[in-house]
Image (cartoon, grey):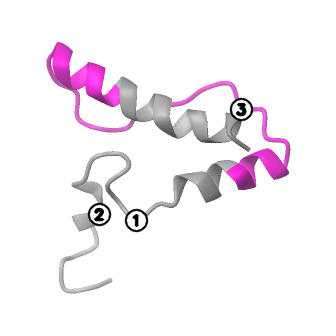
């Protein structure tokens, strides 16, 4: 924990935090993970906000196909 507090990292958009999504997706592929569900556990919003969340998740998912 740092001076910003434990929850500070939850107040960023997908792809803007410190998760290294290409590495995460590579690790999932290496263990042959076949999960069927993804959940965007973020605050919702209007149509534009939901579109942005969908596009961010699409980008994260695309990393597994680039491996």
Residue at 57% x, 34% y: name it. Answer: 61
Circles 2 and 1: CB distance less than 8 Å? Answer: yes
Q: Mark 1 points at which residue?
A: 18
**Nearest to N terminus: mark 3 or mark 1:** 1
Q: In this view, does 7 lie above or below 44?
A: below
For residue 4, side relative to residue 19 (left or right): left
44 and 61: which is toward the camera: 61
For residue 4, side relative to residue 63 (left or right): left
Residue extending farthest to the front is 66
Q: How far apart are marks 3 and 1 (CA)?
A: 23 Å
Callout 3: few (<14), some (14-19), or many (20+) C-alpha neighbours within 10 Å? few
Name the image quarter holding the C terminus.
top right
Q: How far apart are marks 2 and 1 (CA)?
A: 8 Å
Q: Is residue 13 above or below residue 56?
A: below
Q: Is residue 31 magenta?
A: yes
Q: Distance between the residues labelled 2 and 3?
A: 25 Å
Q: Which secondary structure, mark 2?
A: helix
For residue 56, side relative to residue 39 (left or right): left
Q: Mark 2 points at which residue?
A: 9
Q: Name the residue under label 3.
A: 35
Residue 41 placement (x, y as % from top left): 37, 38
Residue 7 placement (x, y as % from top left): 26, 65
Q: Which secondary structure, mark 3?
A: loop
Q: Which secondary structure, mark 1?
A: loop
């Amino acid at each position: 924990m740092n001076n910003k507090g434990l929850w500070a990292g939850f107040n960023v958009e997908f792809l803007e935090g410190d998760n290294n999504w290409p590495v995460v997706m590579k690790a999932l592929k290496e263990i042959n993970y076949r999960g069927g569900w993804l959940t965007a556990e973020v605050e919702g919003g209007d149509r534009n906000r939901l579109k942005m969340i969908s596009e961010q998740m699409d980008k994260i998912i695309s990393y597994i196909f680039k491996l």
